[in-house]
Amino acid sequence: MSAIDSIARTGLKAALSDLQTTGHNVANAQSVGFKQSYVRLNDLYSTNLAANTQIGIGVQVAGVEQDFTEGASEITSRSLDLSITGQGFFVMRNTTSGQTAYTRAGQFQLDKDGYITQNGERLRGYAAFQNQITTNLVDMQVSNTPVPALQTATVDLEINLDSTATVPANPFSATDPTTYNHRTDNVIYDSLGTPSNLTLYYIKSGSNAWDVQMQINGASVGTGALTFTSGGALNTATGFTGISWTTTNGSNTPQLFDIAFTGSTQFAASNETRSIAQDGYPAGVLTSFDFDKDGMLTARYSNGQSQILSQVAVAKFPAPNGLANIGNTSWIETSESGNAILNSANSRNAINPGTLELSNVDLSQQLINLINAQNYFQANAKVVQTSTQVNQTVIQIQ
Amino acid sequence: MSEAALYTGMVGAKQAFMQMQLISNNLANVNTTGHRAELPIFSSYMVQGEGLPTQYYSVMDKTAADFAQGPMINTDRNLDVAINGPGFIAVQTVSGSEGYTRNGSFVLSSEGFLKTDKGDYVLGQQGLITIPPSQNLTIGQDGTITVQGLGQNERSVTVVDRIKLVNPPLNSISRGTDGYFYSINGTIPADNKVKLVPGNLEGSNVNPVDQLVDMIEASRFFELQVKMMKSADENGAKATELLNL
């Protein structure tokens, strides 16, 4: 008699596991990065019976499998919300226990030290050195350290000087515009980041030949000469390398810099300045940071400079199904999942900044599961009831 | 005479009981992926002995599997396949023998082997299937497994292997104790005509309504047999009373 009971009991147990799993899925239908699970059932056969009348002995829960399909993404536009496209996990480190966990949820926060955290665990990434990503795995941090000033070393000028201009009659004087033909003004920086005005005066000295008077903040720092070919292209530029400027504010002195006239021309067209650039900048404080689609964390500073700080690490597994769930929608690696595969290539095109991966629970499917599991339970309960009736009939034989 | 009737009734009750056991197993596996319902096969045997051949035993001497197509359950999981129409997926079980199943819910092991959810190896054209470290694994309708290498773009896909699919005559296989089917005479060659439906699983083909109705019938049948046993017992008692005279 008990055979029927015990078969039905395996069915009841399986139905309960199914209900539990479905309940858990439904409860997490709104959890960011959650992966739904499902019950795997296997039939059971005993070896005791004669080969040709083999009746099964029920069902067993072979395991609760996790479904790692990608959830839908939600656009939040929050700079610290990230989601991963395709396979892969964020790498998180618990600072107290040192344990490494993996998650698909990407709702990050900044802690007081600038570390990027989630549930108190720090996001791991590859450190950058001079804007190049290294293989060094570190806790990702947005540090508040300002960018130091950089003194100007090169000024790039691209100008056109009017070939039809006449040689000025009077000797050069900065205050008299008739003593020069053209001027350019731009700002250069010393090692403390102090801006100074660099003014260049162009004086025609003969056909295809020009003198250049250089002044910083109204004081002369030297002269140079430009010659052009008959085709109007720059021929020679002398006196523009190692220009020495004595500063008085405590910065590096003398400050040496070069001026390059690459691309400058002398045509029968009006004097014009096509572009001015220089490589110095003042000190800057952190104004913002952002992630790009490769997971690069870039800090932006008030002086217009930017710097790559690190890159979000993405871990992949030979068998993600083998990962052990430790709660907080995160997993740890096991012998069944294999070791994490970590390399910078995993992050390429894999990160969606400003989006979150929603739970991959399909509510309609879960509700159908719920109905199924309930029917499953009832059918097996009916078997128990019938078995009881049979038992009573047997007892009443006498 | 009366004793023979008592035993005929007992055998009938025993068969009814075994059928109920079978039905409860079917009902317990109503949600088991790829499960094939069991069917009881009854035969009648004449009771040998003195007198006229008026009694027949009913014996459930065989069980068979019902190979009707189960329902398709859409899962959208890349490692789930269902077989559309006849056919089986070949697996290598723990014991090393080649088994056949309709359950196409696969997992990847950490060593890169494609396994069934029971942990047995799925067979390809040349033995076990090994998946290299990759992404975007897909299984085609004919069982071909393709992957996209790590860091490769979507167009550079490689064919890894092709799942061994077989379509043996249904009377040449029998169910083993692990729920897989085994060939009675030798390994079955691959059949290219078996078609898979990727992203789906085939549910159990047990029909719970039929099974519950059968269960009621079996329990009525059981009660009937018990009644027969009672009558035979009473007849025997009356006969004994006659002899007492």
Image: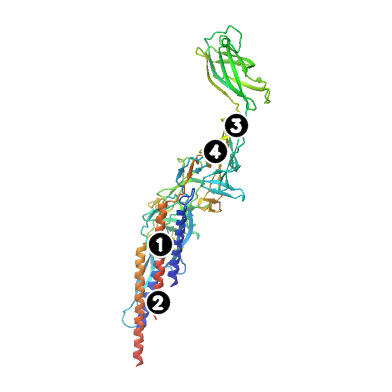
Marks 3 and 1: same chain? yes
Nearest to the observer: residue A31 or residue B90: A31
Mark 1, secondary structure of its residue: helix
Specify which label sits upstream in the sequence, 2 or 1. Answer: 1
Q: Is residue A361 left or right of residue A255?
A: left
Q: Where does the image place residue B210, in percent across and percent down from the top left?
A: 34, 64
Q: Where does the image place residue A242, in percent across and percent down from the top left?
A: 65, 20
Mark 2, secondary structure of its residue: helix
User: Nearer the observer, disc 2 or disc 1?
Assistant: 1
Within-10-Å neighbours for mark 3: few <14, some 14–19, many 20+: some
Nearest to the observer: residue A78 or residue B188: A78
- Separation (CA) of disc 1 from disc 4: 50 Å
User: Nearer the observer, disc 2 or disc 4?
Assistant: 4
Specify which label sits upstream in the sequence, 2 or 4. Answer: 4
Specify which label sits upstream in the sequence, 3 or 2. Answer: 3
User: Nearer the observer, disc 3 or disc 2?
Assistant: 3
Q: Where does the image place residue B180, in percent across and percent down from the top left?
A: 44, 60
Q: Which residue is mark 1?
A: A376
Q: Amino acid at mark 1?
A: Tyr
Mark 3, secondary structure of its residue: loop
Q: Which residue is mark 3?
A: A284
* Cβ atoms at labels 2 and 1 below 8 Å apart: no
Q: Point out which mark residue A296 bears.
A: 4
Specify which label sits upstream in the sequence, 3 or 4. Answer: 3
Specify which label sits upstream in the sequence, 3 or 1. Answer: 3
Q: Amino acid at mark 3?
A: Gly
Residue A150 in which image quadrant: top right
Within-10-Å neighbours for mark 4: few <14, some 14–19, many 20+: many
Q: Point out which mark residue A394 bears.
A: 2
Within-10-Å neighbours for mark 2: few <14, some 14–19, many 20+: some
Q: Is residue A190 above or below residue A27?
A: above
